[in-house]
Amino acid sequence: MPSVKVNNIEIYYEVHGEGEPMILISGLAGDSQSWQFSINTFSNHFKTIIFDNRGVGRSDSPSPPYSIEEMAKDVIGLLDFMDINSAHIVGHSMGGYIAQQIAIQYPERVKKLVLESTAPFSSRRNIGLFRNFYNCWRSGIDMELWLQQFYYWVLSQKSVEDKKFFDSIVKYTLDYPYPQPLEGFLGQINAIENFDVNAHLNKIVAETLIVIGEEDILIKPKEAELLYQGITHASYPSYIEKVGHSAHLEAPKAFTNTVLGFLYKYVR
């Protein structure tokens, strides 16, 4: 599988499909495979690029701290390597932070912007929550228990109560051959701790879709709605019913249909 050295680290990436370029940016602790339920649909329409952020998967995990600005440069470096001047950018959670940073700092590189389950800042509660997750991991907690606690925050009540689905997600993560190192998790936490672009949202000029899980308890809908208030060309948020923080995981068909409907409005 391909990797490329950008911004002084090795970044793992995959390319699926042909057409206009689209790049998908994962959230905290997630890597390229977090898009597994969406990639086939997107790649039928676009040249779809998935990759592992620094600190996770098959990309390098340099010593912390990391920053969202640095991670945005990683994405730009990958696009430069692939000779892509601009792309549709889809960012989930922390990936949405990175996508916002790109749209603010490199507006010419963004065709259309999709922000899923994200906000223009990190709440003090979430910073404390992830610090606690880090401390529990460092203390040697059983990883199955750790993952269960993590997914309680990420998934909707319906998915948590679906024992077969919930257990399969936990098992998949436990068995995944490229687990995130503890140091990489800390580096990504460092990045989100210092993220706040609320005062700079007016610099985003791309047409923007905001996707919100109706039952998201990690980044609350009211926090995500600040993006609509601050981004000039943002469409009214699209709410996906009965999902939590990861619509692309819990309701991939509804998520991909929402994104494609937005993009095709401008691509055709």
Image: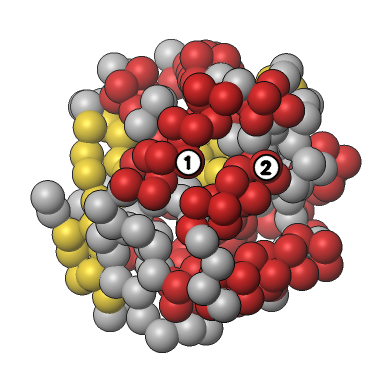
Q: Name above or below for residue 79 compared with residue 139.
A: above
Relative side of 125 to 119, left or right = right
Expressed as whole percent of the image width and height from the top left, the position of residue 69 reads 53, 71
Expressed as whole percent of the image width and height from the top left, the position of residue 246 reads 59, 35
Residue at horizontal 29%, vertical 71%? Answer: 60
Disc 1 residue type (three-letter): Val
Q: Can I make out residue 68 in this image? A: no
Residue positioned most to the front: 142
Residue positioned most to the left: 1
Task: Answer few, some or many: residues within 10 Å of disc 1's Cα (few below 14, many 20 plus, some between 14 and 19).
Answer: some
Task: Answer few, some or many: residues within 10 Å of disc 2's Cα (few below 14, many 20 plus, some between 14 and 19).
Answer: some
Expressed as whole percent of the image width and height from the top left, the position of residue 259 reads 53, 23
Q: Can I make out residue 40 in this image? A: yes
Count of residue discs: 2
Element on which disc 2 rests: helix
Residue that carries the numbered disc 1 in the rendered image: 170
Does label 2 or label 1 sit earlier along the sequence?
2
Residue 5 position by quadrant: bottom left
What is the number of the mark on residue 37?
none
Which one is nearer the viewer's eye here, 183 or 239? Answer: 183
Residue at horizontal 83%, vertical 47%? Answer: 223
Q: Please identify the quadrant where the C terminus is shown.
A: top left
Which one is nearer the viewer's eye here, 141 or 239? Answer: 141
Residue at horizontal 47%, vertical 64%? Answer: 72
Residue that carries the numbered disc 2 in the rendered image: 152
Residue 48 position by quadrant: top left
Element on which disc 1 rests: helix
Which one is nearer the viewer's eye here, 162 or 130? Answer: 162
Disc 2 residue type (three-letter): Tyr
Q: CA distance from mark 2 to mark 1?
A: 11 Å
Residue 183 position by quadrant: bottom left
